[in-house]
Image (tube, rainbow, N blue to C red):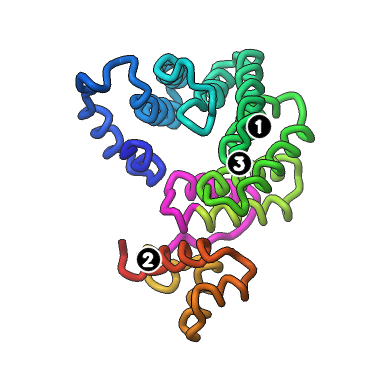
Amino acid sequence: MLLGLQLDCGELEAAAATALAYEPDADTGPGSATLAPWHEALGRRALHERREADALKHFEDWRDVVVGIDNPACFANWRSASALALSALGRNDEAETLAAEELELARSFGAPRAISVALRALAHVCVHTDLEGPLAQLEEAVELVAESEARLEHGRAQLDLGTLLRRGARRADAGRALGDALEIARACGARLLEERALKELEVAGARVQRAALRGADALSPSERRVVALAIEGLSNRQIAEALFVTRKAVEWHLGNAYRKQIGR
């Protein structure tokens, strides 16, 4: 929904206004599952602002409106979100239990994005005791969504993996993962993810230029490759074959490049 998109784009003031303006009507009463994205977004905003107790309350409200829905790919990934809030509150045992439950449910349904979200949550809450297990979980998360349409989730998984690799003193591997996260964040217009990736790259000692807002300098390396082949006259199918990617990926890169050229 709009609130979630505003958060991803870093438009925090606009997100706050959207949240205040929202009033459920008679068809979306307090028990309606259609409120799940709203509770999710409000909880995410609270987590970003380090209001963990408020975040947990929103995630519990989210849980309450999706009672009977078990598929984490369909409104019901409140467990992983709650796990992050619980972990921030020092309630690690509860956090690990919820994250593990969601991962089991996600695997049973088989949706790559949902499995990745659960893997990232479990890695986050388990990292205080071990690095190897969470690293394996994050590597699996990246691999699962790398070829999917869940581009933003791919970026988040790369960011989490790069952050953990940096903590494990694997700077070269960390730089590659964080660089991929930054490229995806810029392509998706996900400003919050971009800022986090930039901060992690700076901590890792990498020099990164801030993204240009428009024009050729704003294009990611992948977008430049696709645009260069398109300028040469290759069709989308031919570009996909030349770069060993899907036609959807080519269309996605071309669309992003066009938006950056016109400044939208």
Q: Earlier in the sequence, mark 3 or mark 1?
A: 1
Task: Say if the magenta span includes residue 11.
Answer: no
- What's under tag 3, amino acid-wise? Pro
Query: Does the rendering let one see residue 32?
Result: yes
Q: Residue 211 magenta-drawn?
A: yes
Give the residue at mark 1. 107
160 relative position to 220: left or right: right
Which amino acid type corresponds to the residue marked 1 in the rendered image? Arg
Task: Kindly tell me whether residue 214 is visible in this rendering.
Answer: no
> What is the crowding at mark 2: few (fewer than 14 residues within 10 Å), some, or many (at least 20)?
many
Query: Which type of secondary structure does the marked residue at label 1 adopt?
Result: helix
Q: Residue furthest right?
A: 132
Type of amino acid at the residue the image marks with label 2: Lys
> Is 179 located above or below residue 35 in the figure?
below
Q: Secondary structure at mark 2?
A: helix
Q: Which residues are magenta?
A: 185-212
The C terminus is located in which quarter?
bottom left
- Above or below: residue 97 compared with residue 34: above
Q: In the rendered image, which residue does mark 2 sit on?
A: 260
Task: Specify whether 127 is left or right of 195.
Answer: right
Q: Which residue is the site of mark 3?
A: 112
- Distance between mark 1 and mark 2 Cα atoms: 37 Å
Name the quarter where the N terminus is drawn: top left
Instruction: Name the spot of residue 185 as percent of width and height, x first.
Output: 49, 52
Query: Marks 2/3: CA distance?
Result: 29 Å
Considering the whole magenta stretch, tell me its main secondary structure.
helix
Which numbered disc flags the more N-terminal residue, 2 or 3?
3
- Residue 9 is situated, as x and y percent measured from the top left of the image, at 38, 46
Distance, label 3 to label 1, CA atoms, is 8 Å
